[in-house]
Image (cartoon, rainbow, N blue to C red):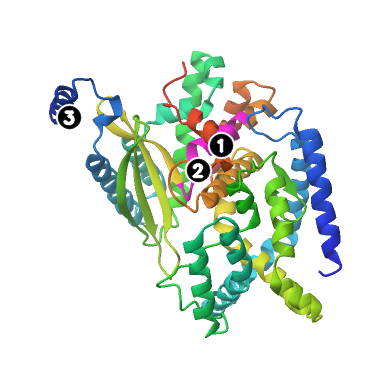
Amino acid sequence: MVRARPSVSALAASLLAAAILTGCASMNDEARDPLEPLNRHIFAVNQAVDVVIVRPLAVTYRDLVPDPIKTAVNNFLNYLKSPVILANDLMQGEWKRAGETVERFVNNTMTLGLADIAAPRVPFHDEDFGQTLAVWGAGDGPYLVLPLIGPSNPRDALGIVVDWFIDPVYWTARNNRWDGLTYGRTAARVITARVDTLKITDDLERTSLDYYAALRDIYRQRRNDEIRNRATGPTPRAAAGEEKALVREEQAPPVATN
Amino acid sequence: MIDRRLFLMSAAALALGAIPPAAGAIEPDAAKTFINSLANDAIQLMARKDLPGPERTQKFRELFKRGFDVTAIGRFVLGRYWRDATEAERAEYLKLFEDLIVATYAGRFSDYSGETLTVLEGRPEEDRFLLVMSQINRSGGNPPIRIDWRIADSQGNPKIVDVVVEGVSMSITQRSEFASVIQRGGGKVQGLIVALRDKTKSLQTR
């Protein structure tokens, strides 16, 4: 993973450049997916990798690992992400949430991060640099399907890279040559994230007419929901200004057209 | 019910010296009651595992049509292509759309395992809608799922026009999915109808 790092960021950067260069031509398209042919291609490859490797691992993990261990793994992953979440809380000016992240970290340290004893008072919240960019006013840009990572966009792809570089856990592991920690953590994140979405993706794949298009839209809506910090209603800041206008127009009374 | 609303509307009109906007017609409490009663009926239906498949699907279809404004949702989801569609295409599309939703949710309902719905709050939205917020409570320490119901007045009755699950609008998702199917099928509504026919058939025979 240490050696893989530069190539991942180089990949993200070149995808970003490609997206920006080709993106402007047909941005008026409702789907905002100017790279759709390429995206669909990468999507198909990702699907194949999922069917052969990721999904079977996730199903095995879900079915064979006892619940208390799964809970401890989730807690520990959340615990390790605390510094990145805190940094993003602060960069977004979310002082109260930053305080919650610190309080959770201090409390849960007593269990080495394996149990979430803070949760009853201060539930977990996530943050990432893609969301911070959105709060700062960056639009999401064209849709991108990243190899192995999946649905994304230039803003969130950049966010992944920045989160990696500001993560003290990553640097500590790297400086101490604890490669196992970085590999293990990455694997655990991929598997647990896949477990979380298994039911939804299985259902969607079965019932949708165009799985790719459905996921594309769901990804955008989910991200906007996360940017709003799960509050119902329109996105508060300029972040999703474009999206807001779009949604408002779309939410016009369904009886309008004739 | 209608009398009461008329009374409230005229009272409000008198008080404000103006005609209130149309969706002021549904009161938050009435909308919450509406969602609660639908949810109770749905849970009762889901809990009846003895019911044979076709009968279950039929009962679910009735429930769905009682709660949802199928025509309005169908038109919204078809978006700008509604105008392009012929009368015959519209009729077949609406029928297939209903079949798709019924088959989709009948499948989802079959793995019901004791979840309950808690209605939290109802509030007006953009003069036209009422948003009822709720959550599905799950067992085994799983966090609840957030569901918002967008409700509009349909000829004096509250009807659901959108369901928003964890910030994801079902109508908006389906709308962009259907647009994609139409575009990839050469911009013809007929392409969507064929795809819908195939999909509902495969879902029903499962």
Q: Which residue is mark 2?
A: A235
For the point 29% across and 53% down, the residue is: B44
Instruction: Answer yes or no: is residue B200 visible.
Output: no
Q: Nearer the viewer, residue A41 or A56?
A: A41
- Is A221 contained in the magenta span? no
Q: Are marks 1 and 2 in contact (CB under 8 Å)?
A: yes
Vertical arrangement, residue B24 with respect to residue B38, above or below: above
Q: Main secondary structure of the magenta part?
A: helix
Q: Write down the region rendered in magenta.
A: B165-179
Classify residue B199 by image quadrant.
Answer: top right
* Chain of the residue that carries numbered disc 1 in the rendered image: A
Of badges 1 and 3, the one in the foreground is 1
Distance CA(mark 1)–CA(mark 3): 36 Å
Vertical arrangement, residue A196 with respect to residue A225, above or below: below
Residues behind callouts 1 and 3 on a single chain: no
The amino acid beneath tag 3 is: Arg
The secondary structure type at the circle numbered 2 is loop
Distance CA(mark 1)–CA(mark 2): 8 Å
| Badge number at residue B5 | 3
The secondary structure type at the circle numbered 3 is helix
The secondary structure type at the circle numbered 1 is helix
| Badge number at residue A241 | 1
Q: Position of residue B142 (x, y in %)?
A: 45, 66
Vertical arrangement, residue B12 with respect to residue B149, above or below: above
